[in-house]
Amino acid sequence: MIKIAIRHIGLFIILLVALSSCSVTKYVPDGKYLLNKVKLVSDDKRVHADSLKSYLRQTPNTGVFGAWKLQVNIYSLSGPDTTKRINRLLRKMGDAPEIYDSTLTIESCQQMTRALNNEGFYSAQVTYEEVYKRPKRVNVIYHIHSGEPYLLRNYRVDIEHPILRFVASDPKQSYVHSGENFSIENLDRERGLVAERMRERGYYFFEKDFISYSADSALNSRQVDVTMRLSNALQQSSDSLKDKVFSTYIVNRVFFYSIDDASSTKRPDTIFTDTIDDGKYVVAYSKRSLLRPKVMIGNCAINPGELYNDHDVERTYELLNSLGPVRYSNISFRETAPGELTCYIVLTPNKRMTFQVEAEGTYSAGDWGVEVGAGYTHRNIFRGAEALSINAKAAYEWRQAGSNAMEFGGDIALKFPTALVPFLKAEKKQRMVTSTAIKFNYNYQLRPGEYNRTIAGAGIQYRWQGRNSRFSHTLDLVEFNYVYLPWVSASFREHFMGSTSILRYSYEDHFIMRIGYSGYNSNFRASQPLRNYRVIRYNIETAGNLLQGICAAANAKKDDDGAYLVGNIRFSQYVKADFEFTYYQIFNKSHRLVYHVQLGVGYPYGNASSLPFEKRYFAGGATGVRGWAARTLGPGTYRSQGGKIDVNNQTGDINLQLNVEYRAKLFWKIHGALFVDAGNIWTIRDYEAQPGGAFKWDSFYKEIALAYGAGLRLDFDYFVFRVDYGVKLYDPSLTGSDKWRRRPTWKNDMAFHFAINYPF
């Protein structure tokens, strides 16, 4: 097997050498040049050159690791005869060379100059320099000379309409401030903000184009006085248009149109045959409505009888588009009477049912493992946007040291598109996107020679997302888990569950009643996909406190260790917190660096001497320190006997993980990655069964494992198949100079990981 892997790696290296030797200028015509590199240089720290990259009209072909133009190499492998399939395939997988066009360079200078003018740098100049290289290559350097900016000295509003003057004069909500650059961009954003606030007050026909500015600059002062006024077009328009613009409008009725067939091209009046009308809301549909009328109305923030409000329209879009059965919605208005609007909402259905399959595999120290899963989702099981999801998974591990292990299980969840909270008014529910899920799960583990274990659970979970969609929250109001071990081998019982083993509680029957909260925050913007962004996840949970209080008040019985029992079963008591931060540094659409930090701490107390096994951390694997297989690293300097995988003892209460990964598109749908991983797990206490596993402030940094490696990804847009090859660099479980793996071996220091989607 190792020989096969070496042979494949050798062939891959030969292919890369062949590609790199193929000239990228093969299809560059004589007298033309390949645009090799582009560089932007600014002479002013106030102007960041990178912020102007979006104005470039021509950019070079992307290169792997910033230099190697692999995709152009692949294109160059093709022959001139495009009737041959192989040539067409190579050209499709690669990129044609970017032939330098000086006219586009001149346009780029003009575009960047205009952008600087819009930010107040009216004396800015952008020049370019061409540096020709052999063979047939050219580098372009843009020199950005910003000059001194014009500043806004005085800003005032000269508008007679009292409401508009009040809205436009609010300094607390303004993009324009005295002393800042005279920015056309900010002035335009200010017009949009004023129009938005007017439309939130019922002025439906008010647009930002009805606002204009006049600017006066003092001679040689680089200072500008700006006045906001009504546009000349509006001032010179007819009185009827002025009355329309400055009149408030009430929404009289809301019509819902439910389309059965998302691909239907028929006219609405021919496909909607049935209606339900309560005087305010009308639901029109053919055959049967996509959703029950009550659900549509409950997720509509536009209320008949109230003033039109842009914010209500945005909220309605968010509420309706969050429903699983709705693929997308369209909202429009029509003036049906003086001062009145009728709202029309068209809902296009999503797929009712979906299926998904995923797989993950690992290989380390001669042991292979594979996990497969399948899922089914029905997004509208009761025609109220209730989503039923059923997931199942199975895992198998081939172990050289003993009998093979297996695991299977699944979960069922029924999610309601609202917060099932008594006495919560519909108006408050409409302020945020909410859902309630009732969940059940089951898991069975078979580890011959050790134990058989069953884990079953149920819970109620709330999710909500406020007006700012960057934040989302999850509350596990109550969750129950029961862990039952019907069979335990004598050797395992003696080693892990003896009277002297403080970890025995992790492997005995126990009961968990927990409450938890988790949050998610991201500043990613779909409208700016090449902008750097970050993702934050955090979680805190606790268990056993309520049961502890009830048992203490009732003077319930205790076991020999002084722990309370519920139905002769010990219950867990602990607190646990996790934090995860990921930062994406985007160079261009094909290259990025990803930085990842993960911290976690769990602390058992009261009725428990250790965390439950399923709540403990493990290290290694496809999403951890990838030089180790899953559950084979740590805790601390702990090393399993005989180099065997010790799933039971290689767990901990503290988790630290640091990752840096460079991702680059290679060609076609193939992406590559280089990564460095660091991390480990530790125990809170110094357990006898886990020597060297305890966390200590004066030594933990010496116990952080290091690994490096490379990976390939097959990106199909809707999912990513990933293969990672990790190598140990620093192994804290070894001693002396052996910790640094200068000469790594296939058997002990390398791991392959097969997984779906990115690790973080």
Image (cartoon, rainbow, N blue to C red):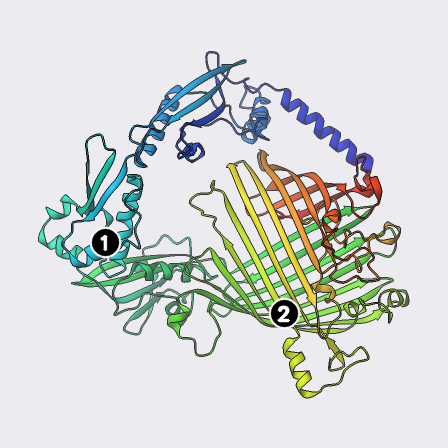
In this view, 331 is above or below 727: below
Name the residue: 66% across, 60% down: 601
Are discs 1 and 2 less than 8 Å apart at CB? no
Q: Which mark is residue 401?
A: none
Residue drawn where x is 57% and y is 26% of the image: 69
- Callout 2: SS: strand
Residue 175 visible (yes or no):
yes
Residue count near mark 2 (Cα–Cα under 10 Å), binned few <14, some 14–19, many ≥20: many
> Is residue 699 shown above or below 110?
below
Circle 2 is placed at which residue position?
A: 542
For the residue pair 715 and 562, the one nearer the viewer reads as: 562
User: Residue 505: where, in percent of width, then height?
Assistant: 78, 70
State left or right for residue 497 relative to residue 698.
Answer: right
The amino acid marked with disc number 2 is Thr
Q: How many marks?
A: 2
Residue 745 is left or right of residue 258, and the answer is: right
Q: Closer to us: mark 1 or mark 2?
A: 1
Q: Is residue 715 left or right of residue 380?
A: right
Mark 1 surroundings within 10 Å by alpha-carbon count, few (fewer than 14), some (14 through 19), many (20 or more): some
Q: Disc 1 marks which amino acid?
A: Ser
Picture residue at 23% right of the left edge, 33% below the top: 221
Residue 107 x %, y %: 35, 25
Q: Nearer the viewer, residue 98 or 468?
A: 468
The quarter of the displayed image where residue 518 is located: bottom right
Q: 476 or 175, which lies in front?
A: 175
Question: Which residue does the numbered mark 1 point to in the structure image?
Answer: 169
Residue that extends furthest to the bottom in the rendered view of this protein? 554
Is residue 260 in sight in this rendering? no
Name the residue rendered at 75%, 49% in the picture.
703
